[in-house]
Image (cartoon, helix red, strand yellow):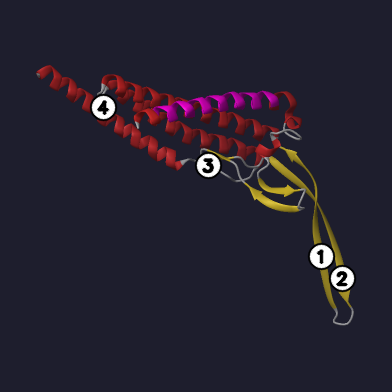
């Protein structure tokens, strides 16, 4: 079972490392081409969130993309033309009006796209470090056969910090993007924050357990 866990952690570490490279390429692409680096490229499928117009069905549909608690919103800004037609019923004296919105293309907020790309890349980096810590913890328990080790306590401590930092990155990224787009969406990954605090407490338990093992070993 431990071998499967190690293989899964290594695979996830590799996948997130690839995501870091992809994030850096996205950042470079947007910096070089600005709004044109999004429109008409594969990136528009990533940044088209919120109420999105579907040209095939001529309808509006909500679309969301979330990166470990960070919602990508406000980058895609559709434009609509409003037209209205009025009808008068001379028999009853009532009036009717028909208001129609016609899709007229969209704009992409380059600044918000850059902020979300940077925040997403940092989150992927932190997740890579977390899975790297998990790999090291599994390797150390296999090698030494001891559960309570100073190194494992240290790895747990840094893992807890990384989880809290992901929550902080979500908050800072969404705040900065909101200043540009005024979409009113602020994110904080409370699940990762709670897990991070719990693992920090757990690391103290492991550190204390390793000290007890050392003291018992000296007595024996």
- In percent of width and height, residue 162 lies at 43, 29
Task: Check if mark 1's residue and mark 4's residue have beta carbons within 8 Å.
Answer: no
Q: Vertical placement of 217 versus 86: above or below?
A: above
- Which circle's residue, 3 or 1, is located before the other in the chain? 1
Q: Vertical placement of 21 versus 50: above or below?
A: above
Highlighted magenta segment, given as a residue range? 6-29
Q: Which residue is mark 3?
A: 187
Nearer-the-camera pick, 202 or 184: 202
Q: Marks 3 and 1, Cα distance to the nearest angstrom?
A: 38 Å
**Is 109 displayed left or right of 199 in the figure?**
right
Task: Check if mark 1's residue and mark 2's residue have beta carbons within 8 Å.
Answer: yes
Task: Check if mark 3's residue and mark 1's residue have beta carbons within 8 Å.
Answer: no
Nearer-the-camera pick, 148 or 186: 148
* Viewer-nearest of discs 2 and 4: 4
Q: Tag on residue 98?
A: 1
Q: Residues within 10 Å of mark 3 (few under 14, many from 20)?
A: some
Q: Residue furthest right?
A: 90
Q: Residue at x 18, y 23 (%)?
A: 213
In magenta stretch: residue 17? yes
Q: Is residue 130 visible?
A: no
Q: Marks 1 and 2, Cα distance to the nearest angstrom?
A: 8 Å
- Which circle's residue, 4 or 3, is located before the other in the chain? 4
Q: Which residue is mark 2?
A: 87
**Is 95 displayed left or right of 145 in the figure?**
right
- In percent of width and height, residue 89 lies at 87, 77
Q: Which residue is mark 4?
A: 147
Q: Marks 1 and 4, Cα distance to the nearest angstrom?
A: 71 Å
- Which circle's residue, 1 or 4, is located before the other in the chain? 1
In magenta stretch: residue 87? no
- Which circle's residue, 2 or 4, is located before the other in the chain? 2
Q: Secondary structure at mark 4?
A: loop
């Amino acid at each position: 079972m431990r071998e499967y866990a190690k293989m899964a952690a290594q695979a996830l570490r590799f996948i997130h490392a690839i995501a870091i490279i992809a994030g850096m390429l996205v950042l470079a692409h947007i910096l070089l081409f600005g709004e044109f680096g999004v429109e008409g490229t594969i990136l528009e499928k990533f940044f088209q969130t919120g109420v999105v117009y579907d040209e095939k069905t001529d309808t509006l549909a909500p679309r969301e993309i979330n990166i470990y608690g960070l919602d990508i919103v406000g980058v895609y800004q559709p434009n609509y033309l409003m037209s209205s037609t009025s009808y008068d019923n001379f028999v009853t004296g009532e009036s009717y009006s028909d208001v129609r919105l016609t899709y007229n293309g969209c704009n992409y907020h380059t600044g918000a796209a850059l902020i979300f790309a940077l925040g997403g890349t940092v989150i992927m980096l932190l997740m890579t470090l977390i899975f790297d810590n998990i790999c090291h913890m599994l390797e150390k328990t296999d090698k030494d056969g001891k559960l309570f080790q100073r190194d494992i306590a240290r790895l747990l401590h840094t893992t807890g910090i990384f989880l809290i930092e992901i929550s902080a990155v979500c908050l800072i990224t969404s705040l900065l993007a909101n200043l540009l787009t005024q979409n009113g969406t602020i994110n904080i990954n409370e699940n990762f924050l709670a897990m991070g605090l719990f693992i920090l407490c757990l690391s103290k338990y492991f550190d204390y357990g390793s000290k007890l093992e050392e003291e018992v070993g000296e007595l024996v």
